Image: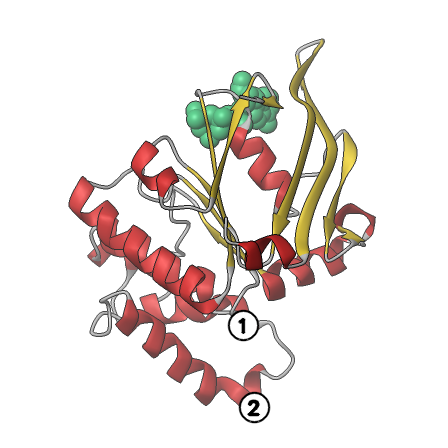
Amino acid sequence: MSSSMEQSEVIIEARDIHREFSLLRNRVPVLRGVDLQVRKGEAISIMGASGAGKSTFLHILGGLDRPTSGHVLFRGRDVYDLSAARRTELRADSFGFVFQAYHLLPELTIEENVLLPVMRRLNWIHQAGRYRERAKELLDQVGLGERGQHRPMELSGGEQQRAALARALMSDPEVVFADEPTGNLDSQTGELVLRHLFALTQDQGHTLVLVTHNEQVAERCDRTIHMKDGKIDQV
Ligand SMILES: Nc1ncnc2c1ncn2[C@@H]1O[C@H](COP(=O)(O)OP(=O)(O)OP(=O)(O)O)[C@@H](O)[C@H]1O
Ligand SMILES: [Mg+2]
């Protein structure tokens, strides 16, 4: 990590996160005290065996799933102290999500899918033209400039994943959360998606938290944490 990075502010922080799930009559502990500080502009990868709790942790960090105990602070504010409505707003304005399943809405065009994160903004009606420009720019950057009027089912898996990436970046999020964004893709398409992801996050000062099973992908991040049995493995 560069020294300038060490000085930059902590943008998101997890404090002693525990998460249990109820299965039948059992309480299954999945996260057992996870702490993490992520600095602004940093790219962090999370690795670990299947079932270690990586996705669960990413969802909690991203304000999508309330921990059983512990705190997630975004810019010093407890994400789970906010009302559900404010948390939704925070996610829409400040976070971008890229998951393995693309979650594109099939009835919307690619361009409309990319525009979704900003459509609920109050200024949407007045700024629609400007937002459309931005959506086109992002689609261009991921190589889908000519595909905006297509429906998701008319695109290949890799193209859908790139569309999902454009959508994640539409709101110019401060933090991008990615869960095995290349897991479904062949290595060449995966490389293309990654290059876009890194270009659009690191180069523009966004913060990236990326779950991956791939060493080479992890090596491209500033720092890697390893999870094991619901904890961060101190190696
Ligand atoms: N909603 C849920 N209800 C019950 N158990 C759950 C739930 N979500 C996750 N789990 C359990 O928590 C454990 C961790 O799951 P998680 O998805 O976080 O793992 P992971 O590290 O992302 O694994 P993978 O690399 O396979 O994606 C698993 O044993 C899983 O079965
Ligand atoms: Mg997972």
In percent of the image, x 60 and y 71: which residue is there? 120
CA neighbours of label 1 inside 10 A, class few (<14), some (14 to 19), many (20+): some
Image position, residue 143 (x, y; %): 22, 67
Which amino acid, by three-letter code, is at mark 2?
His
**Front residue of this view, candidates 32 and 170:** 32
Judged left or right of residue 30, residue 54 is: left
Which amino acid, by three-letter code, is at mark 1?
Val
Q: Which mark is residue 126?
A: 2
Image vertical order of residue 154 relative to residue 62, above or below: below
Mark toward the start of the polypeptide (2 vs 1): 1
Residue at mark 2 to residue at mark 1: CA–CA distance: 12 Å
Image position, residue 42 (x, y; %): 52, 53
In percent of the image, x 44 and y 20: which residue is there? 49
Q: Quadrant of residue 8?
A: bottom right
Image position, residue 178 (x, y; %): 45, 46
Image vertical order of residue 233 relative to residue 56, above or below: above
In terms of secondary structure, where does tag 2 sit? helix
Q: Which mark is residue 95?
A: none
Residue 122 visible, this angle: yes
Q: Quadrant of residue 217?
A: top left
Judged left or right of residue 36, residue 119 is: left
**Front residue of this view, candidates 176 and 131:** 176
- Residue indicated by mark 1: 118
Which residue in the rendered view is the most extreme toward the top? 25
Image position, residue 58 (x, y; %): 56, 39
